[in-house]
Image (spheres, rainbow, N blue to C red):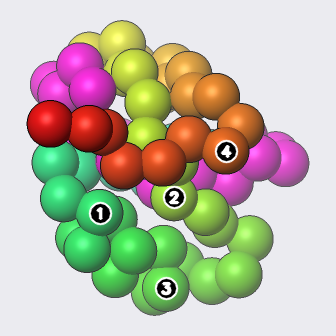
């Protein structure tokens, strides 16, 4: 099943670490936070890189909002 934002290369990912599940990738942290809230406490929001069309998403611990 496709995820929201599946073609984005970078953005806010909504994910569950164990077991791994990438629920979506968003350009806005607010959209990502809204989805994470609906999915439950196992999901978190991280900013990182996404391989379009896949569930591959990489991020650094402590990642914050990108700087302009």
Picture residue at 29% right of the left edge, 63% below the top? 29
Q: Earlier in the sequence, mark 1 or mark 4?
A: 1
Point out the frontmost of discs 1 and 4: 4
**Label 4 sits on residue:** 62
**Image coords of residue 16 (percent x, y):** 68, 54
The answer to which image quadrant residue 51 occupies is: top left
Nearest to the eye among marks 2 and 4: give it.
4
- Mark 2 to mark 3: distance in Å? 10 Å
Membership of 12 in magenta stretch = yes
> Given contact means CB atoms under 8 Å apart, are the residues at marks 2 and 4 in contact?
no
Residue 56 at what x, y percent from top left?
51, 19
Residue 2 image position (x, y, % from top left): 28, 39
Do the CB atoms of the residues marked 1 and 4 lie less than 8 Å apart? no
Per the image, the residue denoted by label 1 is: 29
Task: Please report the residue visible at 61 percent of the width from the left and 63 percent of the height from the top.
Answer: 44
Q: Which residue is mark 3?
A: 37
The relative height of residue 61 versus residue 37 in the rendered view (above or below) is above
In the depicted structure, whether residue 41 falls above or below residue 29? below
The residue carrying mark 2 is 45
Residue 53 visible to the viewer: no
* In front: label 1 or label 3: 1
């Amino acid at each position: 099943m496709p995820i929201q934002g599946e073609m984005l290369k970078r953005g806010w990912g909504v994910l569950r670490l164990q077991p791994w599940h990438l629920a979506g990738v968003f350009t806005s942290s607010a959209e990502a936070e809204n989805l994470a809230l609906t999915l439950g406490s196992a999901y978190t929001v991280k900013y990182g890189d996404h391989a379009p069309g896949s569930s591959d998403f990489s991020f650094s611990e402590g990642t914050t909002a990108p700087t302009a």
